[in-house]
Amino acid sequence: MLPISIKTPWDDRAVEKQVDEAIASGRTKIKRSHMKLGPYNGYSGDLRDLADWKIKIAIELGLIPEAEHCSVCGTIEGRIDYHNEDYSRPLQTIAICMKCHMSLHNRARSPGYAASWEKRVKEYGDGTKWFEHISRT
């Protein structure tokens, strides 16, 4: 099953090209993380780490905004990051709070996590949201 496409207000391919140019020319101060990420959606941890780096550079360059509110629950409280479903398109990304993000990524680990994700989908979905189209497990 192919990952869902996340709609962004920016042209993710154009932004990625600018980010790649900034990396190649040394125009970024952002260092790549040394955090070890596991695979997700068939993408390796290394590819996920690369996506995270490119997102941070895009923010630094003002190409995408800092994440301000969760696209799932709407909160503006706490840490809000970006989430990818398709790591081959690293700038096709969407803001998500830590609670929703952990629930989303851990949904296949146990029935408890799966129930937590399902509860969020039911509570915040309306039939039109990106997260309603993600596999429940």
Image (cartoon, helix red, strand yellow):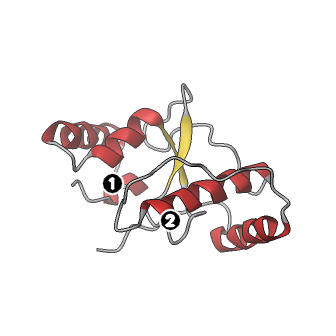
Under mark 1, the amino acid is Glu
> What crowding class fits label 2: few (fewer than 14 Cα within 10 Å), some (14-19), or many (20 or more)?
some
Camera-side mark, 2 or 1: 2
Q: With respect to residue 17, does 75 lie above or below?
A: above
The answer to whether 52 appears left or right of 20 in the picture is: left
Q: Where is residue 96 in the image (x, y as percent from the top left)?
A: 49, 42
Residue at the spot x=68%, y=43% of the render? 66
Residue 50 in the image, given as x and y percentages of width and height = 58, 61
Q: Tell me where residue 113 sits by quadrant.
A: top left
Is 116 situated left or right of 83 in this image? left
Q: Where is residue 39 in the image (x, y as percent from the top left)?
A: 37, 60
Return the x and y of residue 21 as percentages of the image width and height. Answer: 79, 71
Single out the residue that lies furthest toward the left: 111
In the picture of the structure, the residue carrying the numbered disc 2 is 47
Q: Where is mark 1, residue-wise?
A: 132
The picture quadrant where one finds residue 45 is: bottom left
Of residue 13 and residue 22, the one placed in the foreground of this image is 22
Q: Dividing the image into 4 quarters, which one contains the N terminus?
A: bottom left
Q: Determine the CA span between mark 2 and mark 1.
A: 24 Å
User: Which labelled disc corresponds to residue 68?
Assistant: none
